[in-house]
Image (cartoon, rainbow, N blue to C red):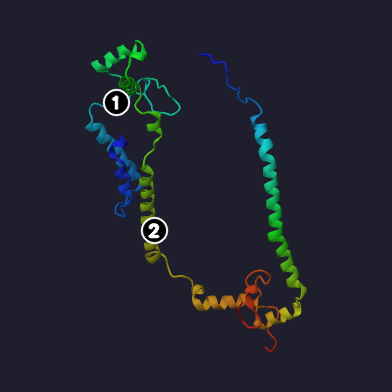
C-alpha cells in the first residue's frame, strides 16, 4: 500500500517547516482514521480472519502458509493446470506469472526499503522545533528573575575571591592567574 | 547429479575457541596499551606537575597573601 503513495510524499514532509503540530495521540488517531477510510474505499479487500493461515512477506519464511492469490481467474487456472505437467514446457513469462500467483513480493522487493525515514526524521524535527518554541515561551513568560549573583559585577567579585583563595593552584583555576602581574596568563 | 569432487566439510566445532584464540591476545594487548598510554600521558605529567608546584612552595607566604586578601574568618588582615 505504501508504495502507491510514492516516495515523493516522504520527501515532501521534510520540507514542511513548523506548520503542522501532530501530537503523538493525534498521530495514531490520524493513522487509524486513514486505515478506516482505506478499508471503506476498497470494497474488494477481504476482512482479515486471523483464525486461518495467512500469507506473509517475510525474509525468513520463503514459502508462506497460503499462496498470495487465492481466487484464480480462468486463465490462471489454465496456467495452474499447465504447471502440473513438465516445467520445461513453461515459458519465462508463465513461470514469472506462477511466481507472482504464489508470492506478492520477491526477496529484492522485500529488502528494498523505503524513504520513510525521511518522514520520521521530519516529524521528529517538527516535534523538536515546536517544543523549542514552547520552552522559549516558558523561559520568557513563566520563569522568574535570575539570581543577582549572576550579574557581571557579582561574578567578578566571585572570581576575585576564587583567585584570592588559590582555587586549584596546581592545574586549574589559579594556575592560569599571574599573581605578580595581577592578570590572566 | 553427483560430481566427482565434493565440497569441503565446514568447521562444526571449536568455533568459539578459534575466535577467542585470535581475539583474546589482541584484547589483552589493546588493554595493556591503553593502560600504558594513560600512565605516560596523564598520571606521570600530573605527578610531575604536583612535584614542581611544591618544590618551591612557600606556605607562609601564600598564607599571608590569602590573609591580606581577606578570605579567612579566623584571622583578619593585618592592620584592622
The chain under label 1 reads A
Against B52, is A20 above or below? above
How far apart, in angstroms, are the residues tagged by discs 2 and 1?
Answer: 44 Å
Of residues A92 and B36, the one drawn nearer to the viewer in this rendering: A92
Residue tagged by mark 2?
A132
Against A97, is A125 above or below? below
Q: From the viewer's perspective, tell me whether residue A135 is left or right of residue A37.
A: right
The chain under label 2 reads A
Q: Which quarter shows the N terminus of chain A?
A: top left
Percent from the top left, x then y, of residue A164?
A: 64, 78
Q: Is residue A23 something that shows in the picture?
A: yes
Of residues B34 and B56, the one drawn nearer to the viewer in this rendering: B34
Percent from the top left, x then y, of residue A77?
A: 27, 14
Of residues A142 and B19, the one drawn nearer to the viewer in this rendering: B19
What is the number of callouts on the image?
Answer: 2
Secondary structure beneath dot 2 equals helix
Tell me which residue sits at (63%, 74%) in the image.
A176
Tell me which residue sits at (68%, 60%) in the image.
B41
Q: From the viewer's perspective, tell me whether residue B42 is left or right of residue A42.
A: right
Figure quadrant of residue B75: bottom right
Residue tagged by mark 1?
A47
Percent from the top left, x then y, of residue A41?
A: 22, 33
Numbered tag placed on residue A176 in the rendering: none
Q: From the viewer's perspective, tell me whether residue A110 is left or right of residue A33.
A: right
Secondary structure beneath dot 1 equals loop
Tell me which residue sits at (35%, 44%) in the image.
A25
Same chain assignment for discs 2 and 1: yes
Figure quadrant of residue A183: bottom right
Label 2 CA crowd tier, 10 Å (few <14, some 14–19, many 20+):
few
Amino acid at each position: 500500500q505504501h508504495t502507491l503513495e510514492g516516495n515523493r510524499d516522504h520527501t515532501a514532509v521534510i520540507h514542511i517547516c513548523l506548520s503542522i503540530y501532530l501530537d503523538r495521540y493525534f498521530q495514531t488517531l490520524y493513522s487509524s482514521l486513514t486505515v478506516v477510510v482505506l478499508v471503506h474505499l476498497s470494497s474488494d479487500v477481504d476482512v482479515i480472519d486471523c483464525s486461518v493461515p495467512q500469507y506473509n512477506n517475510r525474509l525468513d519464511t520463503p514459502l508462506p502458509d497460503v499462496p498470495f492469490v487465492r481466487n484464480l481467474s480462468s486463465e490462471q487456472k489454465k496456467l495452474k493446470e499447465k504447471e502440473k505437467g513438465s516445467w520445461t514446457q513453461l515459458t519465462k513469462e508463465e513461470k514469472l506469472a506462477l511466481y507472482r500467483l504464489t508470492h506478492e513480493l520477491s526477496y529484492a522487493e522485500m529488502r528494498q526499503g523505503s524513504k520513510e525515514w525521511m518522514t520520521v526524521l521530519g516529524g521528529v524535527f517538527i516535534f523538536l522545533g515546536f517544543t523549542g518554541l514552547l520552552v522559549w515561551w516558558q523561559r520568557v513568560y513563566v520563569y522568574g528573575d535570575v539570581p543577582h549573583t549572576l550579574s557581571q559585577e557579582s561574578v567578578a567579585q566571585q572570581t576575585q575571591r576564587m583567585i584570592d583563595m588559590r582555587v586549584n593552584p596546581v592545574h586549574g583555576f589559579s594556575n592560569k592567574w599571574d599573581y605578580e602581574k595581577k592578570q590572566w596568563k | 547429479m553427483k560430481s566427482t569432487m565434493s565440497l569441503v566439510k565446514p568447521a562444526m566445532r571449536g568455533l568459539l575457541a578459534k575466535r577467542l584464540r585470535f581475539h583474546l591476545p589482541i584484547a589483552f594487548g589493546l588493554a595493556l596499551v591503553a593502560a600504558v598510554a594513560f600512565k605516560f600521558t596523564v598520571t606521570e605529567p600530573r605527578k610531575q606537575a604536583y612535584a614542581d608546584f611544591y618544590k618551591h612552595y612557600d606556605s607562609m607566604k601564600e598564607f599571608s597573601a590569602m590573609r591580606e586578601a581577606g578570605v579567612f574568618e579566623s584571622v583578619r588582615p593585618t592592620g584592622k
